[in-house]
Amino acid sequence: MLAIAMGLRRGEVLGVALVVDLDERVIRVGNQLQRIGGELYQDTTKTGKIRPVPLPLICLAALRWHRFRLAGAPAPSSLVFTTRTGRPIEPRNLNRSFSRLTASAGLRPIRLHDARHGCATLLTAAGVAPRVLMEILGHSQISMPMDVYTHVAQDTQREAISHMDRLLKRRPDQA
């Protein structure tokens, strides 16, 4: 849900800390969980900065349900998403789980990172300003989300160009 609705990277999803304040409806994205050189470690995000990202209601409900399910479970980790034994989730296992979920939903194979692309595309189509999109996705330059993550739908282009009919229409009172 966090990857789809908020555009979080795989490592950012796995690095979400238990200190999420659901009443405030904000996740402070500042950690990531990665496997590099055979070693699983928690580190700061790519930019090294903590970015507050508002939680959509659909994510808030999912996180509240997740917190309810975890009540009383072992929690040796400071992470929201762990294995049944409370250990950090292996990044490749998140990919596998996502693949199973998309297949069970009857969707074509979709990579977890494609959810990030989809989020950016939907937010762009909804008219979200490039600067805001950049901050939500955690990029340091506007060009990155605009060039890489947005794929403007043909209908959106058609709607945009339709404004030209209205803007260029000759008024009857003008000669």
Image: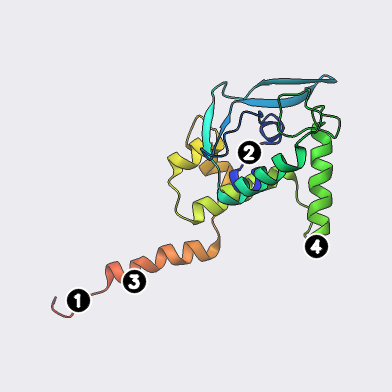
Are the residues at dot 2 and dot 4 in contact (C-beta closer than 8 Å)?
A: no
Residue ID for mark 2: 8
Q: Position of residue 54 (x, y in %)?
A: 52, 40
User: Looking at the image, is mark 3 or mark 2 earlier in the sequence?
Assistant: 2
Classify 22 as above or below 42.
below
**For this rendering, which residue is in front, 55 or 127?**
55
Residue type highlighted by circle 3: Asp
- Single out the residue that lies furthest toward the bottom: 172
> Which residue is pictured at 54% across the width and 23% down the height?
49
Mark 3: secondary structure: helix
Identity of the amino acid at label 4? Gly
Colouring style: rainbow
Q: Name the spot of residue 80 as percent of width and height, x first.
A: 71, 33
Q: Nearer the viewer, residue 43 or 78?
A: 78
- In the picture of the structure, the residue carrying the numbered disc 1 is 171
Q: CA distance from mark 2 to mark 1?
A: 48 Å
Question: Can you see residue 91?
Answer: yes
Return the disc, 2 or 1, that comes first in the chain's sequence.
Answer: 2
Q: Earlier in the sequence, mark 2 or mark 4?
A: 2
Please tell me which residue lies in front, 60 or 121: 60
Nearer the N terminus, badge 3 or badge 1?
3
Residue sitting at 13 percent across and 78 percent down? 173
- Quick one: label 1, few (<14), some, or many (20+) residues within 10 Å? few
- What mark, if any, has residue 106 been given in the picture? 4
Nearer to us of marks 4 and 3 is: 4
**Contact? badges 2 and 1 (CB < 8 Å):** no
- Mark in the foreground, 4 or 1: 4
- Label 2 amino acid? Leu
**Residue behind mark 3:** 165
User: Dots 4 and 1: beta carbons under 8 Å?
Assistant: no
